[in-house]
Image (cartoon, grey):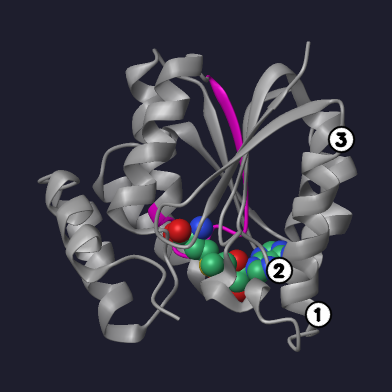
Amino acid sequence: MELLHPELDAYLHRLSEHGDRVLAQMEARAAQTRFPIIGPVAGRFCYQVARMLGARRIFELGSGYGYSTLWFAKAVADNGGGEVYHTVWDEGLSRDAQQYLAEAGLSHLVRFRVSEAVAALRETEGPFDIIFNDIDKEGYPDSLPVIKAKLRPGGALIIDNMLWHGRIFDATDRSPSTEGVRRATQALFSDPDFFSSLVPLRDGLVLAVKRS
Ligand SMILES: C[S@@+](CC[C@H](N)C(=O)[O-])C[C@H]1O[C@@H](n2cnc3c(N)ncnc32)[C@H](O)[C@@H]1O
């Protein structure tokens, strides 16, 4: 299902032109291979949240070949330095991400982990200013307690695909991925330790702040 009116989508993309050669290369690859990157509109939003929080430590779950990582690494660099964790269970994608981040001159800020992402987060010392979640959607509900434990008070959780291409609106869709998105949304919006908003950019981003 197309969630955004095509005119609105085109307008948001025009407003999000970035002129970055490496990001553009990664966007071209996503278009050619139909790889699900967050894209420039959501990437810009993630960069902005990271700048507003002055984030120095960011953990990403489900990083693919590093497109969202590059947006976060740019923010951390502009915040004065720090570290961004890139986690994916595919060695080839991790290698590709290392090349892209090196080409962008930011690989010194990124820690690359080839692992199941929630397990990697559990094993990594917190706290983090931002945790970004883009793993397989059936894994969203079980990831939340681990994320909460690793986020600093006042830190932000961003989760991608929270509109799941409109599948959440189809009551007959009881697939594990759709149910995962529904359950994670309910859990977050009813959790007194988080204050959450669903931002309908691209496929829906939840932005949740951990209460102090
Ligand atoms: C949606 S893509 C990530 C796109 C990336 N966030 C971006 O915008 O550039 C998710 C990636 O994470 C991997 N992945 C999914 N679930 C994972 C998990 N639980 N642990 C590690 N990697 C996972 C997928 O195989 C895929 O490469």
**SS class of the residue under badge 1?**
helix
The answer to whether 139 is drawn above or below residue 43 in the figure is below
Circle 3 packing at 10 Å, graded few (<14), some (14-19), many (20+), is few
Most distant residue in the bottom direction? 172
Q: On the picture, is 176 further left or further right than 15?
A: right
Which of the two residues, 17 or 19, is positioned nearer the viewer here? 17
**SS class of the residue under badge 2?**
helix
| Residue contact at pointers 1 and 2, CB within 8 angstroms | yes
Which of the two residues, 4 or 164, is positioned nearer the viewer here? 4
Question: Which sits earlier in the primary sequence, circle 3 or circle 1?
Answer: 1
Residue 121 position, x and y percent, is: 78, 44
Residue placed at 79% from the left, 67% from the top? 180
Q: Name the residue under label 3.
A: 191
Which image quadrant for residue 135? Answer: bottom right
- Distance CA(mark 2)–CA(mark 3): 19 Å
**SS class of the residue under badge 3?**
loop
Circle 1 packing at 10 Å, graded few (<14), some (14-19), many (20+), is few
- Distance CA(mark 1)–CA(mark 2): 8 Å
Q: Mark 1 points at which residue?
A: 176
Q: Mark 2 points at which residue?
A: 137
Asked whether the viewer can see residue 89, the reply is no
Circle 2 packing at 10 Å, graded few (<14), some (14-19), many (20+), is many
Residue placed at 39% from the left, 55% from the top? 67
Residue placed at 77% from the left, 41% from the top? 189
